[in-house]
Amino acid sequence: MFDNRDRVGRRWAGVGAGVLAVGLGTLGLMAQPRGLSLEGVHVVPHRQSGEMQYRRKADFSLGARVEVFVRNASTTTALEIPATADVRVRDRTPEQWLEQDEWAWHDFPSAWGGSPLRLPPGAMTVWSWNGKRAPWGTNTAAELNLALPGDASPQRLQVPIAAPQAWISAITFLGTSDIPTSASASASALMPDPRPDSLVVHVANSSGTALTLEAVRLWLPESNASWRALLPRPWIEDRLERFPSDGVIAAGDRGGARVSSGPLPLTYAAIEVRLRGRGGRPTTLWAHQRIKREAFDISGGWVHDTSGGGAKPLESEAFHKTLRRLHVNTAHIGETGGYTDQNGPDGLYTRYPLKYFNKLEPFNRYDTDAVLPRIHAVEFLGEPQYGGGKPVSPQACWKALAPYAPTRLPTSITHSEERLWRFYAGISDYAHYDAYRVTAPSPDAWGQYDRWGGERIRWGAPLETIGEMCRSLRELNRPRPTAYWSQGPHHDWNGYGGRKRGSPTPDELRLQAYHALSSRITSLYWFNLSVRSLVTFPDLLEPMARVGREIRMLEPHYLAGDATSHERVLRDGRPDWDLDVVAAPDTALLFALDLAYRPDPGERVFRFDPPRAASFRFPLPAHLRRPLDVFRMDADGITPVDHTVVEGGLSIRDQASRVAVYVASTRPGERDRIEARRRAAIALEEATGFDPGRRSGDLAVLKELLAKTAK
């Protein structure tokens, strides 16, 4: 129970959140004897936070992102659709809707140009658009007309843009690997085969009836070159580990399946999930995304930055040992002379590899079997919502990323402003955003947050808005995974609202990272681990190492999980805790994040009180409501907690402040597995033999390196 505390949910404008995708049987449409048939529609309603504050009033007219799954209805004849085909939606071309500012972007044949789209008999393709405002939002419809050369009349398909009732909330492609335990682990150990051999599908059921998950099917191209033409693979029915085990997802609940697919190509796929509802009524859910093996990567940002033309940090073993101790395995780099070319048996890159996160061109240098394990994602557009003063349109961003579609390289884009990024949703394979809450530039108006009883500040913003933005980005891009740039040490921020410290305190750093982690991101990027930043704020090294260790302890559950619950708890009308649940097939991660912090008027930093008595109630999906073990975890180890199984979830009583993370598992031995991962993470840290966060001599080595880079 929560005693005298109140609860409030999320504050969102608009109708629901999620994806509704249904098959022909549900739509009631008949397949045409030739031409295209409509197989399903995947609708992602736009959403706009009511919690974020801006100087200008936000636009709350909400559209939707729509994916249309169309199939060549012929069983004998291929269908060719030229780029010049007359495709119209509501009697206008996609280009006209862009010109009239009704759509943000689209990928109809006219956007691709060049060669025609060839659909073999029975093959499918997926067309998308992102409608900007309410006329293109949920509970509307659109007629799609396609006129091909030689047709006496256009083909007409009725596309419902329906409010969600059931949707695929997360799809994650996975492989198998163990955490390395040695600082000298090779690149092959740190960067395993990028090809996945399984996937986890999560389904949210907001309908009024139970749904039974029966089977999953992938639609794959013949090759990456023909990635737009998808052919059906056999239904997977017997290689499913359903959760709940009987596959029944109750009304208002969550469930899904772990799917053993066998090795999969790194290309685009349509994912079809077959369910059965009341009276045996079939329901088919759809999604379209790139197959990429998910790994929880931790980036150091622009680690190669120097303040002069001197020594290069990436050529320094001491710098790499520092990053290794922080569990950083990725950086904003491509091929870098003096580092990535040192890949012999004893080479620097072999011993301290970092995944690439950059433009990654030309393709023939990066899209190779040898280099693919080194790839995190393509990212080169900067912050297109700002574009150096002039925003880059969503369609222009789509066009810049389109050449990567036939490759095996996943794309990413940096989102910046929550009130606008819905227009960019769906453009990339792996969306991420950057927003920092203390002493940093930001699009939201910090002085407008009435968060502390009328006290307004300009040097910081509510830390919990990180979670608000993470949830927004996740829902707009679902079921694809998302990532977050988290605020770390940075030497070049100062002068905000009278605050002297130019980077977060250890508490501020930890809370920002955990508001993102609790929303279920699958990678975290520190901004920004240059040598100068690390030397300027060495008190953040150990806090970052602890966050990295804790990520490695829980990594399998972040990857296989889905965010199933978020709740704001109040005490006497003021924010007290944010409670979040990330639910995997057999384990739930439960987060309690302290909101009872306050701004220090003297030092202008956020202060947290010592641990206080707290009682948390976490709702759990049905398949996790009878856990075998419940415990608290952090970088120091595992602690038993007082807990009770209650109706619909779990009640935990504890002394807590700042961040409390609990684990509830139905899998025997999970406590031992997490502890083993903790010990392996510590072994990796200690094997570096270098600890500049706690040893002055090692910090002096980094300071000497900084001096050399400035020469």
Image (spheres, rainbow, N blue to C red):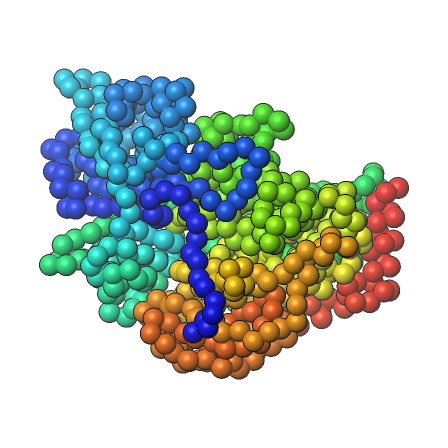
Left or right: 49 in relation to 390: left
| Residue 711 or residue 575, whichever sits in front | 575
Report which quarter residue 333 is drawn in.
top right
Image location of residue 654, percent across then percent down: 54, 77
| Residue 107 or residue 95, whichever sits in front | 95
Q: Is residue 360 visible?
A: no
Image location of residue 434, percent across then percent down: 59, 44
Report which quarter residue 696 is drawn in.
bottom right
Image location of residue 707, percent across then percent down: 87, 48
| Residue 529 or residue 518, whichever sits in front | 518
Q: Residue at x 45, y 28 (%)?
A: 395
Q: Is residue 569 visible?
A: yes
Report the label total.
Answer: 0
Q: Residue at x 68, y 53 (%)?
A: 488
Q: Is residue 479 above or below residue 514?
A: above
Which quarter of the rendered picture does the N terminus lie within?
bottom left
Q: Residue at x 46, y 54 (%)?
A: 293
Q: Is residue 144 above or below residue 439?
A: above
Image location of residue 413, percent across then percent down: 53, 39
Q: Residue at x 27, y 52 (%)?
A: 166
Q: Is residue 98 above or below residue 685?
A: above
Which quarter of the rendered picture does the C terminus lie within?
top right
Q: Is residue 568 above or below residue 303?
A: below
Left or right: 624 in relation to 59: left
Left or right: 571 in relation to 160: right
